Image (cartoon, rainbow, N blue to C red):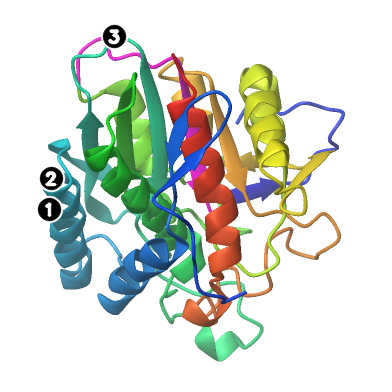
Amino acid sequence: MKLSLLLILVVFMSSCQQKSTQPAVITHPEVEVPAFSADSAYKFIETQVAFGPRIPNTKPHRACAEYLSATLQRYGAQVENQNFQARAFDGTLLNGVNIIGSFNPDAGKRILLFAHWDTRPWSDHDPDPANYDVPVTGANDGASGVGVLLEVARLLGQHSPSVGIDIVFFDAEDYGAPEGFRDNDGHTWCLGSQHWSRNPHQKGYKATYGILLDMVGARGATFYKEQISEYYAPDIVRKVWSAAHKLGFQQYFIDQPGGSITDDHLYVNKLAGIPSINIIQYNPNSEKGFGDYWHTVNDTMENVDRGTLNAVGSTVMYIIYNEK
């Protein structure tokens, strides 16, 4: 993903480690919501990281794709692997795969949940230039969103919601051109979601709304109201932040505007016409906008925190099971 430095008032137009002790089901006044397990999500992240960097055209990438597809299927999803080819900014032909898992496939009302599962091929924001060509491990940037959604999938397989849920793992999100690259139009990122948004897995596919999870596992992470989300789906932003606050996660979900971030939700909004929001780590007071380990060799499991995973996962579960 890429952070735009436009002023927030100019809406984007072009683009701790503690153990979990939750009960099996949390009862809310509205509905019973299966309890999200941060421990389980953490293990899903560890498994992805163990494959190594998940870069298109590599063996770890292919092995991880098989794991993600098989895991969704094991939890009862109707799974489709959407293979595609995309030309990267440097001319490399990428063999990508978007992995789609559908729950309650016959339901008319559908909610789209998505994250990217690939990792950046180089650490171009590392403070040490010697690490520039080292691939990013992607524990937070990539694996965290997928890990949360795999835990959601596990629970969906045990407790069917009243609406249909489609989980999509987008590929080739993080192969975007480095800053300063010639002819960089900003659309070299998010190649998998661009492809899917033009060619959905089902002809005429529509969802009521979508939620993107990106970098949702870091210790002390804060999630501001991202501005592309506010432009295309302000009601969904309010719905999600209100739910997070109701559940007591105010320290994570900050009720203030953030930046405009070119990410998979941009294309799902613009090309697929599905109003979608982005839950993404953002720090307006940091130099990069994201964590210091973003796009560096330090994006490792040491930065992943069960408390953050629980805040995001529990919020998403609350939203799903309160839909009618």
Q: Nearer the viewer, residue 220 or 195?
A: 220
Q: Label 2 to label 3, Cα distance in Å?
A: 21 Å
Q: Label 1 to label 3, Cα distance in Å?
A: 25 Å
SS for dot 2: helix
Tag 1 residue: 70
Q: Measuring 29% from the left and 56% from the top, which residue is drawn there?
A: 92
Determine whether label 2 and label 1 are within 8 Å by CB.
Answer: yes
Q: Measuring 16% from the left and 50% from the top, which residue is drawn there?
A: 69
Callout 1 amino acid: Ala
Callout 2 amino acid: Gln
Q: Callout 3: 10 Å neighbours few (<14), some, many (20+)?
A: few
Q: Label for residue 176?
A: none
Q: Measuring 77% from the left and 26% from the top, which residue is drawn there?
A: 11
Tag 3 residue: 108
Residue 216 visible to an observer of this rendering: no
Left/right of residue 118 with respect to residue 67 in the rendered view: right
**Residue 319 image position (x, y, % from top left):** 52, 30
**Residue 241 image position (x, y, % from top left):** 69, 34
Callout 3 amino acid: Gly
Q: Callout 1: 10 Å neighbours few (<14), some, many (20+)?
A: few
Q: Which region shows up in magenta? A: 202-214
**Residue 278 image position (x, y, % from top left):** 58, 38
Q: Nearer the viewer, residue 212 or 156?
A: 156
